[in-house]
Image (spheres, grey):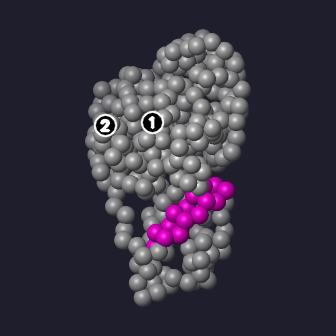
Amino acid sequence: MKFIDNKGNNNPQINLALEEYIVRNFEAEEDYLLFYINQPSVIIGKHQNTVEEINADYIKENNVIVIRRISGGGTVYHDFGNLNFSFLTKYDTKKVNNFIQFVQPIVDALHKLGVKAEMTGRNDIIAEGRKISGNAQFSTMKKMFSHGTLLFNSNIENVVSALNVSGDKITSKGIKSVRSRVANIAEFLEKPMEMEEFRTFILQEIFKNETEIPIYKLSKQQWDEVYQLSKEKYQTWEWNYGRSPEFNIQRKNRFDFGQIDARIDVKDGIIDEIKFFGDFLGYGELAELEQKLKNVLYQQENIKNILLEIDLKYYFGNISAEELAKFLCD
C-alpha cells in the first residue's frame, strides 16, 4: 500500500475529485491510502436531497462549501478538526460493506492512544457509546474505496447549525442531543495532542510494518486532470444540488440499512417520474432503477412484479421487492 500525497490541500472540491480520480484511474492491483483535512464544508451523501439536508442561511453566512460525494450514506460536516481517510483497493465482494476490514488498523491505533474505540452499527466507530467516525464505500467493480471521518477536535456545535438534522435520527435538533451521541477523539485521549501529531501517529501505525512509508506523488498531468474533474463536476450546481422533479406523492421510512425518501409524480394512475433519496449505502446508480419504474401502473402488485427482476440490495440494502412495493404504495 502507498500513501498518496495530497499536497496538504484543504479544499473539499479538490480532495473529493482526487479521491474519485484515483479510484477510477489508478491500477487495480495496487492499494492506496489517502488522508485529507477539509475546510468547513458539508459533504452530502450521493443519494441525498441537498436542499433538505442543509441550513441554507447558515451555509451562506459562513461561507461553508456544500459538495456531494460519490458514496452513499448520510450528510457530514467537515472542518479543520476532522481527519478524513480513504482506503483504495481492488474490488472484492468480501469487502463490500465490510468496514471493519478497512478500519481495524485505525481502531487499533486509537486503542494505543487510550481511546476505547469499536466498530458498531452499519458503518460507525464509537468510543464509550458515542460516535467518533462514520464510513461509506464506493465501487467501480474493478476498484473500490472505503472512506470515513475521524472527529478529532471538530466544532460539533457547527454540525447542528449547518445541517437540518433529521428527526428520525435525533429526537431533538438541539446541541445537547447531538453531544449525547457524537464525540471528539480528543475528549478521550490520555494526553493532549494537536491534529498534525494525531495524523502522523495514525499514519505511522497503519504503516508500522514498513521500514518507511511509501509515498505516491501525482504527476503534473495527473493533478491537471484532478483539477479538471473538480471544475467539471465538484464545483457545479448540477452535481452538488441538482433539480428534484415535481411530485405529488412522498413516501419516507427508515429501514435497518438507512432511510429511503421516495418522491413520485403520478399522472392518470401511471408513474410519470420517481426519485429516490436517502442515506442508505447502496452502490447502484439510482437513475437506472428510477427509469425501470417510469410509465408503470402505480399499483403495489404491478410495481412488485417489476422489482422482482431487480437486485434491490445493490441499490439500497436488504429489502425485498414486496417490502419496497408496499412502502411505495402504502
Q: Quadrant of the N terminus?
A: top right
Give the residue displayed 38% in from the left and 54% down from the top. 51
Residue 63's tag is 2
- 259 w.r.t. 274: above or below: above
Q: Secondary structure at mark 1?
A: helix
Of 83 and 91, nearer the camera is 83
Tell me the SS state at disc 2: loop
Answer yes or no: is residue 290 visible: no
Identify which amino acid the numbered label 1 is placed on: Asn
Residue 180 pos. (x, y %): 63, 38
Residue 253 painted magenta: yes
Q: Is residue 194 magenta?
A: no
Q: Is residue 301 above or below residue 76?
A: below
Residue where numbered disc 1 is placed: 158
Q: Residue at x 63, y 12 (%)?
A: 191
Is residue 255 rendered to the left or right of residue 11? Answer: right
Q: Position of residue 280 (x, y in %)?
A: 57, 54
Residue span colored magenta: 250-264
Residue 40, relative to residue 251: is it above or below? above
Quick one: label 1 or label 2, which is nearer the N terminus? 2
